[in-house]
Image (cartoon, grey):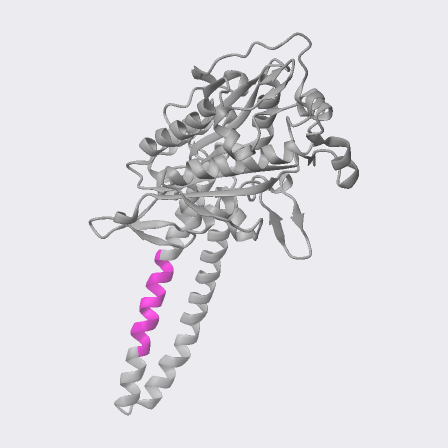
Amino acid sequence: MLLIKELRDNRESVKERLWKRAFRNTELIDEIIDLDEKRRSIKAELDDLLNKTKTRSKEIGNLYKGGQREEAEQMKAEMASLKEQVRLREDEHRKLEVKIEEILVRIPNLPHESVPAGSSDADNVVVKEGGTMPSLPEGAQTHWELAAKYDLIRFEAGTKITGSGFPVFSGMGARLQRALVNFFLDRATRAGYHEFSPPLLVNKDSAFATGQLPDKDGQMYYINEDDLYLIPTAEVPLTNLFRDKLLKEEDLPQKLVGYTPCFRREAGSYGKDVRGLNRLHQFDKVEIVQIAHPEKSYEILDQMIDHVESLLLELELPYRLLRLCGGDLGFTSALTFDFEVYSAAQQKWLEVSSVSNFESFQANRLKLRFKDKDGKNRLLHTLNGSALAFPRIIAALLENKQTKDGIEMPAVLRPYLGFDKIA
């Protein structure tokens, strides 16, 4: 959530930056500032009334002590009117605060100055490519055809049990997924991340704190009876470990990693782009999160990007790194880089990781601060990244590593798998 002070101090600049990310309702900025002016005026009146009330109370006490009961009772009667004015101003102030927040939570984060202009993913900028493109054998198959051939994933069984987008992994397919869990977690802990196994359900306060609510309300699975949400990513519970925290500067950064299933309704998804593992309602992912000093968060963002890149290099997958344009940024992000791997049989790029710096946007909602060297409480910066999401990694591994005799596994996974090839 943006700071009102920033809106007041940089009204036109804020509007320009929001326009860059294709947010057109910039009149909301003016509305918030106008409401905040009223709130500040009422707060000044309220403070004045409270001071008067405090002064009058002392005067009444002194009158009673001095035996001037009649004068005290008269002043006490006058106090009733003063207290009513206080009550009315408090009510006005509270309503304005609620109204301001209702509007403020609808405004996305401001994009970083390096975010390119653009309205859709077509305007994202490729900043780097790596890995080697595979040379597939004649008659190469897609991952869903290979999954059926080797009984790795049973899509129809998942549809029967639950519905479309809930696959069942089988045999070597299940072992491949388990190997990726351990590989990603081992690499993260080796890089200094502290491992957590968080809950898969969160309350509204948690979903609001990381920006899923109200922005992505319709995209999350909701359990009405318990007023809980299934997590869309481990980012939500991991980041909320620090809600309402005041950290010491010397304890920064905080590095967290967690493996969880993720649940996304993905309403309206259909067609060839969602076939097989391309888009699921339930999938597994290892997520890395950092809580950082605001002056070091972009250096840390680069480190997180390097970490994800190292995983793709070890998996021997061709990849590219994209800087997302303003129109493709997530609601809470100031700057996001996406990693995509090439799916050779489908001849398309598949997103497997987003690495983002939210700056203080989430921290403001989380009330997550640190005490700096001058003793001042300041908002921290939060970052997160997929390291990595499994479905499309598995799709790319199956397609890119296929040979006439089976599917070769990357050397780094073989100790985790217990086999070299799916055949």
Indicate the quadrant where residue 357 lies: top left
* x and y percentages locating residue 238 in the rendered image: 47, 47
* x and y percentages locating residue 263 in the rendered image: 62, 40
Horizontal relation, residue 77 to residue 71: left or right: right
User: Would residue 109 be seen by someone viewing this image from the given angle?
Assistant: yes
In the image, residue 123 sits, relative to residue 422, either above or below, namely above
Front residue of this view, candidates 215 and 350: 350
Front residue of this view, candidates 71 and 170: 170
In the image, residue 135 sits, relative to residue 294, either above or below, namely above
Task: Say which residue appears at 44% left-offset and 46% top-offset.
Answer: 195
User: Would residue 12 be seen by someone viewing this image from the given angle?
Assistant: no
Q: Is residue 147 magenta?
A: no
In the image, residue 111 sits, relative to residue 84, either above or below, namely above
Q: How many marks?
A: 0
Horizontal relation, residue 277 to residue 388: left or right: right
* x and y percentages locating residue 342 in the rendered image: 55, 17
Horizontal relation, residue 150 to residue 307: left or right: right
Residue farthest to the right? 160
Residue farthest to the top? 138
What is the magenta range? Answer: 44-57
Q: Main secondary structure of the magenta part?
A: helix
* x and y percentages locating residue 308 in the rendered image: 44, 29
Task: Say which residue appears at 35% left-offset and 28% top-offset.
Answer: 302
Front residue of this view, candidates 396 and 241: 396
